Image (cartoon, rainbow, N blue to C red):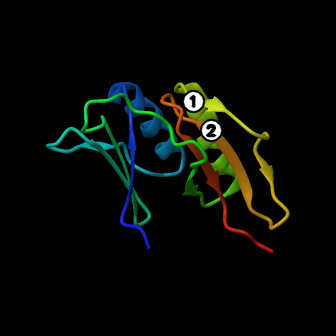
Amino acid sequence: MFTHVMIGSNDLQQARGFYDATFAALGGKPGKMDDRGRLIYAHDGGRLMVTKPIDGNPATAANGGTIGIAAASRDHVLAWHEAGIAHGGTAIESPPSERPNGSFVAYLRDPDGNKLTARTRATK
């Protein structure tokens, strides 16, 4: 349904450290900066893009928004969570855990406050 997700950042170098580490934990590659100054992460057919807002105003996190990132395994979710915390992210909500539908889930806020979740597919 979606071609990509774009989020804003006030510090692209800090964002790059966070997202490079969390995507590596999922088996992805470091982001690439395009000619417009946007970081682009491509993994398993999806794209996440990080940019400074084009209107010149500060980037802010979406209130009520969450970006879900697919993970292949429980170990990937845990590695993603640990890498995020080690690179300026903040653990939020419950600790990484299995949900009633069998998916394994973890939540973080990136250094700019964007809410993210990494999760495995539901098994029930």
Quadrant of res 12: top left
Classify 10 Å Cα crowding around label 1: few (below 14), some (14-19), many (20 and above): many
**Residue 123 image offset from top left, x and y in percent:** 76, 72
Give the residue at mark 1: 89
Q: In the visual, does 86 lie left or right of 60?
A: right
Residue with the most extreme right position:
100
* 15 sits to left or right of 103: left
Mark 1 residue element:
loop
Q: Which residue is painted at 41% across and 68% down in the image?
A: 2
Q: Are marks 2 and 1 in contact (CB under 8 Å)?
A: yes
Image height of 39 relative to 47, above or below: above
Residue located beneath label 2 in the image: 108
* Image x and y of residue 8, in percent: 38, 38
Q: Quadrant of the C terminus?
A: bottom right
- Residue 78 visible within the image: no
Q: Which mark sits nearer the N-terminus, 2 or 1?
A: 1
User: Does 43 sit left or right of 123 as displayed?
Assistant: left
Task: Inspect the image, locate mark 1, and give the three-letter code of the amino acid beneath it.
Answer: Gly
Q: Mark 2: few, some, or many residues within 10 Å (few <14, many ≥20)?
A: many
> In the picture shown, does residue 34 fall above or below 92?
below
